[in-house]
Amino acid sequence: MSLNVENATVIYPGTDGRPPTEALQQINMTLDDGDFVVSIGASGCGKSTLLNLIAGFLAPTEGQIILDGSAVEGPGADRSVVFQKHALLPWLNVLENIEFGLMLQGHTKEARNTVAGRFIKLLGLSGFENSPVYALSGGMQQRVGIARALTCDPKLLLMDEPLGALDALTREKAQELILQLWHDTGKSVFFITHSVEEALFMGTRLIVMSPRPGRITHEFDLPFSRKFLDGTSARSVKASPEFIEIREEVLAIIFADEEAV
Amino acid sequence: MSNTSNENEQKIQSASNSLLSKLTRERPTLPGETYGVPGSGNTVLLSLTTIAILLFFWWLITAMGWVKPLFVPSPQSIVVKFLNIWRDGFTGSALWVHILISAGRVFSAFLLACAIGIPLGLAMGMSPLIRGIFDPPIEFYRPIPPLAYLPLMIIWFGIGETSKVLLIFLSVFAPVALGARAGVRSAAIEQIHAAYSFGATRWQVLRHVILPSAMPEILTAMRIGIGFGWTTLVAAEMVAATKGIGYMVLTASQFLQTSVVIMGIVVIAGIAYLFDLLMRMIERKVVPWKGKM
Ligand SMILES: Nc1ncnc2c1ncn2[C@@H]1O[C@H](COP(=O)(O)OP(=O)(O)OP(=O)(O)O)[C@@H](O)[C@H]1O
Ligand SMILES: [Mg+2]
């Protein structure tokens, strides 16, 4: 799997007399097999727009998105999306929600059950297969969303603030879970977050974006997720001096952007 | 003596207090309910009280002779009339025949309107082409009272069943189609995107996301639609009908049999209400998730 975003520019047309918004300007980015790229930046800097480009929901005004040698033209099963919220289907129970993608792709009931069963176990949802999704806690709903995205064995997982709505404790647990899944399945991930700590902890690479027009201003290679997967505990990774140093650096960049607005 | 009356007063006061506070205070909900949902809460007691009070005033003004029975017959006389007609029939047909005929007209029109209106409404919501074509005619005829185009129906389709059912059909069709059309917008964009990102086709998105999420609005539209159907019944049975509740009401009014008129109205209301209860039950069964996500 290799993804190339080449000189992508997105301009939303202005409506009702407002000027057009240049949401992304000349974005260049690559994402290779096994990469965990995290995007962070002030609100409105175009992170979701970039994710929508990669997912194929949105076409760039200029430039192109190349996935494995061919241009992205619309959404596809090789890229699964985990949304922040509102994406589960309340008329289906937990199992049916997780099987949703497989069902759309026409897999048999047995095949669906085998795959879904694996991810139900992996994400700690055993015993809730028949629960209605609206009766689950926010953290569990998010895990259902992640399980659903994983069932179709996508090459690339796209996550738009998947943990934004969770409490601190559930959030840390979910971070570890996603890292473990990423490690075990070898997927590539594009991940959006507002939390600098989360960004640094999870990613192998961080892209810092800046608004009006949206562009990538800084990039960092990150070692911390590897350290966690090698056995260092999450808290001690996050409390290490190198972590704190780079955290402050990134925070300073983002705050400067916020003030410039 | 004064002691007990005092106590009684207190009891009454505390009872009325608790009723009042029950109705006005915001309490935490029981587990399984959602706090602060606007308008939640049980209204059976209040509704029954209202009905009882209305009946009482009705009875009062007739029993005191404040209005002539020709204008407002007493509640008892309505019941007696009902029993009489139930036993002897009206203009040669048993009451249940009238009821069955009318219900048949309304429900066949309703089913037809749902069978055509729901798919068409969904199609209008999904496709600008179909919306562009069907929006003007539906919006044009929707506000016209059925009585106004009744003569046309009769000129075009005669005085048989066709024009009657068609008139009711038209009054049900517009609200059902427009409800289904609006329901298309119910799905969250994330739900639709999720389906597409699994490689779903447009048809699959319609079938597995748009349609289920539109169900609450469709069911509501069906409830509203059949209400319009009952409203149109009397108009539909105005011409050349020899059976039906609407016919019964109209004929009785010509002979100033006010009690039959009111009895017919109550029967129509009763059937409509029972059907609405049924629809609400179906709603709870089909869309238990309504408003929960
Ligand atoms: N559909 C749209 N039409 C017009 N402008 C839009 C549209 N979607 C986004 N924008 C604008 O594009 C810019 C980038 O939006 P985007 O949603 O990508 O930001 P974001 O980085 O995801 O923000 P947040 O962190 O708040 O989610 C914003 O200024 C926004 O107002
Ligand atoms: Mg966003």
Image (spheres, helix red, strand yellow):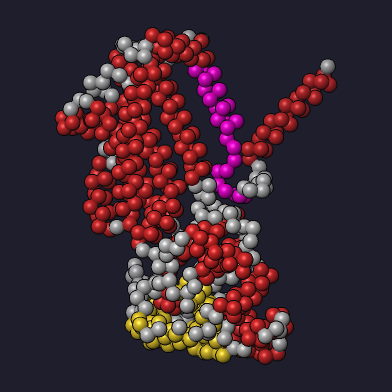
Q: Give me the residue at 54% from left, 52% from top.
A: B292
Res. A171 image quadrant: bottom right
Q: Percent position (x, y) of residue A75?
A: 39, 72
Image coords of residue A33 (percent x, y): 50, 85
| Quarter containing the N terminus of chain A | bottom left
Task: Give the main secondary structure of the magenta stretch.
Answer: helix
Closest to the observer: B163 or B140?
B163
Residue visible at 62% across and 89% down?
A: A223
State the residue in front, B140 or B170: B170
Tell me, yes or no, whether the highlighted magenta stretch contains residue B255: no
- As drawn, the residue found furthest toward the left would be B155
Magenta-drawn segment: B34-58
- The question of residue B41 being in magenta is answered with yes
Residue A54 visible at all: yes
User: Image point 75% across, 25% down: which residue?
Assistant: B9
Q: Position of residue B282 (x, y in %)?
A: 48, 40
